[in-house]
Image (cartoon, grey):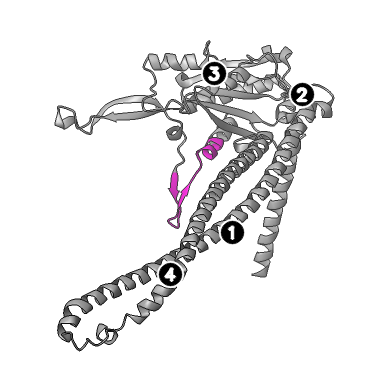
Amino acid sequence: MNDKNYSVARVEQHTKASIGKSERHIERKNESYENMNVDLSRTPMNVHYQSCGETYNAQLDKLVEEGRISLRGLKKDAKVFDEMIFDVNTAYFEERGGYEYACRFYEEAFHFAQKEYGQENIVSAVMHADELNTALTEQLGHPVYHYHMHVVALPVVEKEILWSKRCKDPALVGTVKEVIHQISHSKKWASPKITDENGHTQIIKSYSLLQDRFFEHMRDAGFADFERGERGGTVQHLSVTEFKVKKETERLDNLETTVAFMENSISFLEGQTEEAQKKADKAQARVDKLVPKMEQIEDLARKYTNDADQVLPPPDVLESAKSYREKKAMPLYRKIIGVLRNLFDKYLTLKHDYEDLQRKYEREIDGGNQMKKTIKRLNEEKDSQSGIVAKFYALCRGFGEEYIESQAMGILEREAMERQQKKLTRKRHDRDAR
């Protein structure tokens, strides 16, 4: 058996649409429970400390209709149910009488839940006594059951509604119009901020404070010989099995999402690259066609960009030089030179645009190749993670969640002790060095 027994109080959130699955499990409405080691012959031994007598959603609708709680301002898919799960290592109850002791323990835990939520906001509270702990059963040679409790409650907070500026009485604007009991998980479990002695602001996680309150309540009620769930440890929120599955599944989901995004990105980039290639080809064709002409224009422009007086030939002896140069030749040559300069500038601009487009095209090609390499690596990693998750589920199916959980718990506890020992060793070393 475990040397240490840890108390755990964790909270899961549910919408109106998602609560049905948990309700079927908690109230044992399913006909079978694969891979959960549920002994349906013992289900009548489950203890209901509170029952709504109908579905959870029906109870919620009833409270809203009666005006006892409000869903004002909540979205359709808002989290409106809390499922608080109380748990202690199976060995803790087995060493103290089993079922009878567990009934007394969780009755007191139910009183704690009443303080946390209020009696009127608890929908259901059930202690499960029908889930077999296969690891301890094999170890002790007789059936050992894992006792724990599910409390489904509504996270209700008081909210003040103020008179708005539309109020006919200006004196009432900004004052309290009414106080409603609103469902709000975020406000119910808001994490408080504190300022330490150095003036630094720290956030204390609300679930960590919940663990403290639960541990202290049970200890004050006379239940001892167990410890508070490890701070920052997985047992504060999820069982070891659930935590590992959740993290691996989240990682797999993130990988699949990333791969899908990268695949979309490479498709877009390839499309952009094809478009860039078309533009580059058109620009190249235009430049190839214009280059010979532009070379002639360039020479001509350079030749005729000097002062007009140096370019024009002298007048014929029969002509009036002044009249010829000022009224005919000079205006014509100035116009020609202006056209040539303009054409030359356009040629240089076109050449620059082509070169810039070519550089962009080459960068996109390089980027596309890099993205293809990234896609290949992510697909390999995704396949690897898929295999890990599949193997983990296979272990759960083959050995049972309880056994896998107990093994994982033991490993985590040993690793935590080793880390703590290393930390103490470093502190002693540092102190000796000073």
- Is 211 part of what is drawn in magenta? yes
Q: What's the residue at 64%, 15% (across, down)?
A: 28
Residue found 36% across the figure and 28% down from its top: 73
Instruction: Give the tally of numbered discs.
Output: 4
> Does the magenta-highlighted stretch encompass residue 176?
no
Question: Taking 210 as reference, is 390 left or right?
Answer: right
Where's residue 48, x and y in %? Answer: 59, 15
User: How packed is label 1: few (under 14 Cα within 10 Å), some, or many (20 or more)?
Assistant: few
The three-letter code of the residue at mark 2 reads Val
Ranked by sequence position, the earlier of labels 2 and 4 is: 2
Q: Which residue is mark 2?
A: 144
* Labelled disc at residue 293: 4
Is residue 233 among the parts visible in the rendering?
no
Q: Quadrant of residue 323?
A: bottom left
User: Is residue 401 placed above or below 338 in the rendered structure?
Assistant: above
The magenta span reads: 193-212
Q: Which residue is mark 3?
A: 124
Q: Point out the frontmost of discs 1 and 2.
A: 1
Q: Are marks 1 and 2 in contact (CB under 8 Å)?
A: no
Dot placed on the residue nearer the N-terminal end, 3 or 4: 3
Q: Quadrant of residue 10?
A: top right
Q: At label 4, which amino acid type do we have?
A: Lys
> Which quadrant: the C terminus?
bottom right
Rounded to the nearest whole Å, what is the CA distance between mark 2 and mark 4?
Answer: 96 Å
- Closer to us: mark 3 or mark 2? 3
Neighbor class of circle 3 (other Cα within 10 Å; few <14, some 14-19, many 20+) is many
Residue visible at 59% across and 30% down in the picture = 218
- 57 or 181: nearer the eye? 57
